[in-house]
Image (spheres, rainbow, N blue to C red):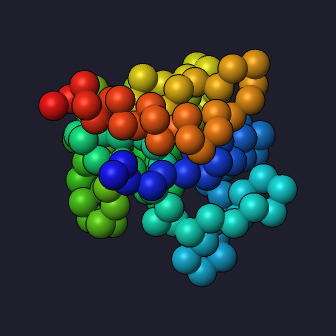
Amino acid sequence: MAEETSLAALQALRAWLIAEKRAPEEAGEDYVLAGGARFPKTTRTPVSSSNNFLPLNALVHAWSTADLPVGQYIRDARTNNVARLAHLDRPDVLGYLKGEKDWSSRISAEPPQSGQAPASGEVAAAQGAKAADNK
């Protein structure tokens, strides 16, 4: 069974980062994103790096530290006990989060068609197909 991830959380985070140009508001263990949507910081997104799905807080950290050299980013992630993007995945994912790209190859789901998010079944199917390809 594929690990549950939230494409909606990823899309809400991206919309927030593009519109607000700052890290999202924190409310306890949640982030408050565009339209008041709340997601736990630990919500797994369909962004994978080093064969792990990354939680929202890892993506917020990567975005917040985008200007740091990679070595400093890695040390900062370790210090703050946050999952991190692999060195080679970082530019691709950051480009997506900043709105410089419409999609990232590190997202384990099919890209939305005509601005529409894929149905949850399509996301699960894409994740299953990717997992089968990696075996």
Q: Residue at 47%, 41% (x, y): give it.
A: 124
Extreme residue toward the right, this view: 35
* Residue 108 visible, this orientation: yes
- In the drawing, does residue 54 fall left or right of residue 87? right
In which image quadrant can residue 70 be found? Answer: top left
- In the drawing, does residue 5 fall left or right of residue 68? right
In which image quadrant can residue 17 be found? Answer: top right
Q: Quadrant of the C terminus?
A: top left
In which image quadrant can residue 127 be found? Answer: top left
- In the drawing, does residue 113 fall left or right of residue 50? right
Along the line of sight, the residue nearer the viewer: 83 or 22? 83
Circle count: 0
Q: Residue at 58%, 24% (x, y): give it.
A: 111
Give residue 24's position: percent from left, percent from top.
66, 58
Q: Residue at 65%, 26% (x, y): give it.
A: 112
- In the drawing, does residue 40 fall left or right of residue 90? right
Give residue 26's position: percent from left, percent from top.
63, 70
Extreme residue toward the bottom, this view: 28
Give residue 69's position: percent from left, percent from top.
32, 36
Figure check: 52 above or below 82? above
Q: Residue at 25%, 25% (x, y): give it.
A: 133
Figure check: 16 above or below 32? above
* Residue 72 visible, this orientation: no
Give residue 68's position: percent from left, percent from top.
38, 40
